[in-house]
Amino acid sequence: MIKRKKLICIIIALVAVSVITVGVSAFSGKSKSKSSIINMNKVSVKVVKVSTSSVTSNASFNASLEASEEGTISNKVGGKVTQVSFENGQSVSAGQALIKLDDTDIRNNIKSSEAQVAAAQAQLNSSESSANSSQIGINKQQTNLESAKRNYDRMKALYDQGAETKVDLENAETQLKNAQTDLQTAKANAQSSSLSAEAQRANIQKSQTDLNTQRESLQNTIITAPVSGVISGKNVTVGQYISPGTVIGKVENISSINAVIEVKDSDLSYVKLEAKAKFKLSSEDSKEYDGVIKSIDGVADPQSRIFKCKIQIDNKDGKLKPGVFGKIKIVKDENKKAITLPLKALGGSKGKYYVFTNNNGAAKKQNITVGEISEDTVEIKSGIKDGDNVICTNVGTLQDGDAVKAAE
């Protein structure tokens, strides 16, 4: 009986120990589970320690691209198109033949003008020969007049002395008058020949001018590229008749290209001639082109009060095209002191920006004011200070007071 009681007590003791052991284990498991849950609720974040440093301050402008040089393809003479030697997008050199017009009529006109010049030249030669003969006649009549004058003077002297008759004196006087008349006639003939020669010279000049015009028109039947560049706006086909001045297309020189921006008066402190600039087709584009400011309007637009500025960009590879938009970046200050953060640390919207700081393991929401925003950084003007640990991941999902854990 006593042995049986001892056995029961031993069993009860063993049961009690088992219960205690199970209870302790269960309590320990619950503690570990609660701790694990707490750790799992902490958001793993990356932080940046804030510090003021020297940064380069840039200004960004919307830009549109245009050719640095543009020439219109047009014709000076009318005619039927017999040949077209270009297509849109083709690169051409200045002076390169692009279009041929029918030149049959012009060539016939040239032959006619050449014949007119030759005929006028022959008439001029005849008039000049006549003028030369007239001059010889004048010299001869001048000699005859002088001889007749001397003869009359001698006869008059003899007649006054009674040594010659009145008839002889009258004959000498008649010869003198005839010589005077002959001289006047010779001079009139010479003047007429001279006027005829002048008229023929004027005729030759006119005919030669007409001939030169026709020859120039012949040259203009070949229409060439006004500048070197790429052709666009083709507006002509073979067989078409085009009138003088028809716009057939245009040539744009894009070996260097201009980025056109609009700036305010306040921007002119750093937007200056020969200042360097950077161009990108978009903020996401990794390719950046170097540019130099080449021109700034001297007068602002009276309506918008802005100045147009052109930045010249090297484009030898031809990848940049006129009419495309992009962004121009110009340095404002290379040694500006400021607090900057990665752009991804910024939350909110314009006028209501904020960041989260790691405040001893808790996310703390801080309202801030921002300055310049670039492609991947933002200037912070107020709201945080040097030494603050700013969270730069999971910003969109964090709430004020969330438990956070800074990633290694």
Image (cartoon, grey):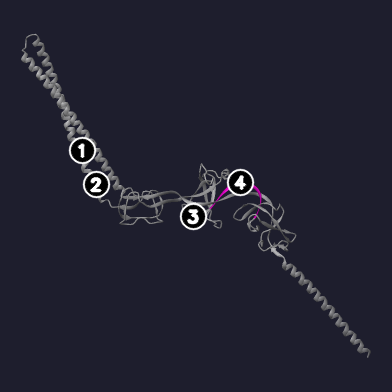
Mark 4 and mark 2: Cα distance apart in space? 69 Å
- Residue under pointer 1: 121
For residue 124, which quarter of the picture? top left
Mark 4 and mark 3: Cα distance apart in space? 28 Å
Q: Where 192 falls versus 167 (above or below)?
A: below
Mark 1 and mark 2: Cα distance apart in space? 18 Å
- Report the disc number at residue 109: 2
- Residue under pointer 4: 333
Mark 4 and mark 1: Cα distance apart in space? 77 Å
Earlier in the chain: of badge 4 and badge 3, it is: 3
Q: Position of residue 102 (x, y in %)?
A: 28, 52
Earlier in the chain: of badge 3 and badge 2, it is: 2
**Mark 2 is on which residue type?**
Asn
Can residue 269 be found in the magenta stretch? Answer: no
**Mark 1 is on which residue type?**
Gln
Q: Where 365 falls versus 161 (above or below)?
A: below
- Give the quarter of the figure containing the N terminus: bottom right
| Residue at image point 18% right, 35% down | 125
Say which of marks 4 and 3 sits in front.
3
- Residue under pointer 3: 324
Mark 3 and mark 1: Cα distance apart in space? 61 Å
